[in-house]
Amino acid sequence: MSDQPQSGQQPGELQPGQQQPQVVRPYGDTTGDGRVQVSFTLPVPFGTATEKARAEGAALQLAAKMGLEPAMAVHAKGMGPDFTFFIVYGRVGHLVDLSQVVVAEREFPLLSPAEVNLRIRSGLGRKLVVVGACIGTDAHTVGIDAILNVKGHAGEKGLEYYREIRVVNLGSQVEVDKLVDRSKAEGADAVLVSQVVTQRDAHIQNVQQMSAAFDAAGPGRPLLVVGGPRYDPASAPSLGVDKVFGKATTPGEVASYLAYSLAPAPAAALAEASA
Amino acid sequence: MEAASSPRAVPAASVTAATGPDRPVTRRLSLDPALVREARELAGRAGQPIVDMARTHTTVSVERVVLRLAGLQGADDDGMPWVNRLADAVRDSAGLEHGVALPAWDALRAGNYPDLGALARDAAAGKVSFRIPGGADAHSARDAAAAALGRGISRIDAQRAARDQMIAQTSQPRMPWIYLIVATGDIYEDIPQAQAAAREGADIIAVIRSTGQSLLDYVPEGATREGFAGTYATQENFRLMRAALDETSRELGRYVRLTNYASGLCMPEIAALAGLERLDMMLNDCMYGIIFRDINPRRTFIDQRFSRQIHARAGITINTGEDNYLTTADAVDAAHTVVVSQLMNEFFGKEAGLADGQLGLGHAFEINPAVPDSFLLELAHAQLIRELFPEAPLKYMPPTKHMTGNVFAGYLLDAFFNLAGVMTDQSILLIGMMTEGIHTPFLSDRDLALENVRYVRDAAGRLGESFQPTPGGFIDQRASQVLAEAVALLRRITDEGLLTAIAEGTFGITRRPADGGRGLEGVIEQADGYFNPARDILDGADAAGDPAAELSEIGVSS
């Protein structure tokens, strides 16, 4: 089954005045040939001749359902008694309509550590100070540590790894008053708080109490950033904080956000970093 | 009982403690022997003040080991282990400056408790007041504690003998040993995966711990089925996995080793559990926790020394974590910091009683492949380390930092890593996955990785005998340069002190002051009359017992 091109033009064909075709197909070695390569494992045995034939048939059935027709299982290998690994080449019938591609807009660009460091150096002219803590009764520091420790999370180093970020990790069960005092003493640009425990909405009340305390402490409030698996990323206004990170946030995202929010970027500097 | 032939005698029956290279290491470089000697002397001078500090201090986790080895197990209704509850209760009323043993065994006798478990339950309920006994009371507390710990250590000795026996009944695999990781979070999922990996050729199975376990100041209890990106290290999980791998070892006729992590705030306790449940290797680095987990430096060094004494006794090979430095710093610029850390790990390890064959010093293939001659640089570094530590079962780690989403390029890079490994006689190869950094490996990723290493081993396994870098050539010079840089850094560390060097961010890039980080509150200076019966035995006051009796004690029939 293949999708119909919307305006009748052939895939890859340029319309007058267009820089790029609007409808494309995968490119193997010829425009519009639709050729792709995939690999996958099926939980089927690959021992006897009958089993091998059945396994290859199963792979081709999956390929056809994925839109690959014709398809060829160029490699099949048994892995242990119960599994077979396949590499399949085939022609995919689907068309890609570039006009329908939606790019998710992030309010801030994702930067590499080098870019974050450069942006802080050029935009702030000193180290960016981050104070992190688990507040209230929450003793689960897994989240804040994954973001702050050099060790990091999901293949990304934590904020301590960034030369231009100074991290003060206060650990767990930090009282709000202490957090406010310490942030002031350290000259915090940003305060990161993580909350895991959600009993009786503790994660919401704790954070609201914290933002109120920072507001009451007068001008120069640091950027308040909250993270935890049960937060709605859209709830920043109701919590009284600047940013909420939900589940599966990585240190790089947090660092990028901090650099974006606290260190204005001269465009030239960024171009240099990515060169 | 035989008299100890050396201050740190180990059971005489043990033949497999030394798991160093199974072939003599070929010398290929023209390293200056005087510089090599100086490097070791400097490492000793830098490390000695740390050892002195570790000998005169204890930690809450060291004291909890005493209770664990005396047989105290289990946890309260909140999951807090009884060893924590009892050690905390002693600390609150009598302090731990004299060690937990004196006040605990004094209270055991005074209260007529049947065992430590009963004492711990009453202590946790606030019903026991502890004291530091004197005179005859102190004597009887010491004797009772020493007897209990003697039984505990003999269980570790018995596991060591059981390992030797298992290897004799199956076989010792040829090096390089293939090291594979499982990490589902659920011990009951880990077991079939580990067994499948062993059948596919893995010689060593490592069970990655749940994220953040290193920062827990207690060891969770029981079989666990939920973890974050790993499975909790618990005594029961250790036992279950070792039993499963014993079954697979017998099936394959090849002893499959089991690895976990003796690191973090409970480093010595996990070492003890590893000894009791016959794990074979433990990640155990002298500085990893400080640099990467912000654990207090003093806490780390004290815990580390005691954990290594236990590993030495248990015949466990440690794996050190130098590969981690290269994930944060540039692998060319920081190559010498790896050598410095290895020399420190060697000094601390041997001081604690580990044999050369128990020092699985770590390093890694992490040079940016875009750097010209990157493979030659890798060979130079790997060969340098091979020659500096010819008796050590070196653990070589695959590329991670420069593995991109391009799995095809990654597969090629892993092949070059495998090639460097066989050319320079590395002992343990952690198998690289082409999906490193993208997702946890698919079944097929692991299979392809094993196919890769098998091809390289079969095609080029004997290349080493014809690999002789030209004296004074690029590889030879680079190795000498890294050694010279390492010696220069060691001179600086010796001058300013290791704790200062760590505080100033010499390793990794993080500054870790001696009074910062987690766990400092658990460090205690020993008072006069400090008593730790486990350490007394490990320090060499006791020699090997009867192996046959030890085996019957853990239910293994000879």
Image (cartoon, coloured by chain):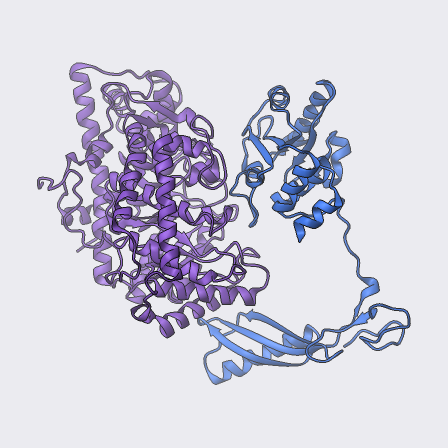
Chain colours: A blue, B purple
Which quarter of the rendered picture does the C terminus of chain B lie within?
Answer: bottom left
Instruction: State the image quarter where residue B267 is shown.
Output: top left
**B511 or B335, which is in the foreground?**
B335
- Relative to residue B139, is residue B460 depicted above or below? below
- The picture places residue A156, in percent across and down from the top left corner, at 57, 47
Farthest residue in the left direction? B2
Farthest residue in the bottom direction? A49
Instruction: State the image quarter where residue B468 is shown.
Output: bottom left
- The answer to whether residue B243 of the structure is visible from this angle is no
Quick check: B518 left or right of B63? right
- Relative to residue A231, is residue A96 depicted above or below? below
- The answer to whether residue B544 of the structure is visible from this angle is yes
**Residue at the image position 45 percent from the left and 44 percent from the top:** B232
Which quarter of the rendered picture does the N terminus of chain B lie within?
Answer: top left
**Residue at the image position 35 percent from the left and 23 percent from the top:** B524
Quick check: A91 left or right of A43? right
Quick check: A95 left or right of B142? right
Farthest residue in the front direction? B472
- Relative to residue B401, is residue B77 depicted above or below? above
**Residue at the image position 63 percent from the left and 48 percent from the top:** A112
**A87 or B301, which is in the foreground?**
B301
Give the number of marks: 0
Quick check: A153 left or right of B249? right
- The picture places residue B86, in percent across and down from the top left corner, at 35, 26
- The picture places residue B532, in percent across and down from the top left corner, at 25, 28
- The picture places residue A256, in percent across and down from the top left corner, at 67, 43
**Residue at the image position 69 percent from the left and 24 percent from the top:** A209
